Amino acid sequence: MSLPKSLLDLRLVQETRKFIIIIYKITELLPDTEKYGLISQMRRAVVSVLANIVEGYGRKTKKDKLHFFIIARGSFREVECYILVLKDLDYISDKQYEYLVKVKDIVGGLLINFIKSKS
């Protein structure tokens, strides 16, 4: 079974899927010592953003939907934190950091607007 077309057509879902790919590619560049640290945490958090949007989308009540959308926002904030840590540890260049922040800001804005529209 695939996701409903209406969900796949949401720009939020499309941009979050791109964000997941970017995070996976960036974390491939991290040292092996981060395999069970930043790599694992970042990947789980970024996938959690999309998973909770999808799960909330499938819920019946407004309250249940919002609960999962807010969890998605929390996972998103977690990814924001990890991006800062990558920069602070010099695991990514200034250019990579700026790119991540740009993509992150797009997803974050879409997520916030999505939650507001469902409140």
Image: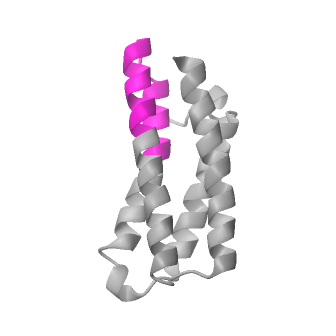
Q: Residue furthest top?
A: 61
Residues shaded magenta: 48-72
The image quadrant that residue 94 belongs to is bottom right
Q: Is residue 67 shown in magenta?
A: yes
Horizontal relation, residue 44 to residue 7: left or right:
left
Residue 66 visible? yes
Q: Estimate the x, y position of residue 104 in percent, counting from the top left.
A: 61, 54
Q: Estimate the x, y position of residue 8 in percent, counting from the top left.
A: 64, 36
The image quadrant that residue 62 belongs to is top left
* Residue 63 or residue 105, whichever sits in front: 105
Q: Which residue lies furthest to the front in this view?
A: 88
Query: How many circles with numbers are drawn on the protein?
Result: 0
Q: Residue at x 56, y 80 (%)?
A: 92
Residue 13 visible? no
Image vertical order of residue 6 relative to residue 85, above or below? above
* Residue 2 or residue 31, whichever sits in front: 31
Image vertical order of residue 71 relative to residue 17, above or below? above
Horizontal relation, residue 36 to residue 95: left or right:
left
Image vertical order of residue 66 relative to residue 45, above or below? above
* Residue 81 or residue 117, whichever sits in front: 81
Q: Estimate the x, y position of residue 57 in percent, counting from the top left.
A: 49, 26
Q: Estimate the x, y position of residue 116 in percent, counting from the top left.
A: 57, 23
Q: Which residue is drawn at 57% across and 34% down?
A: 112
Q: Which residue is drawn at 46% across and 40% down?
A: 73
* Residue 54 or residue 109, whichever sits in front: 109
Q: Is residue 55 shown in magenta?
A: yes
Image vertical order of residue 108 relative to residue 38, above or below? above
The secondary structure that dominates the magenta segment is helix
Q: Residue at x 55, y 57 (%)?
A: 20
The type of colouring in the image is one colour
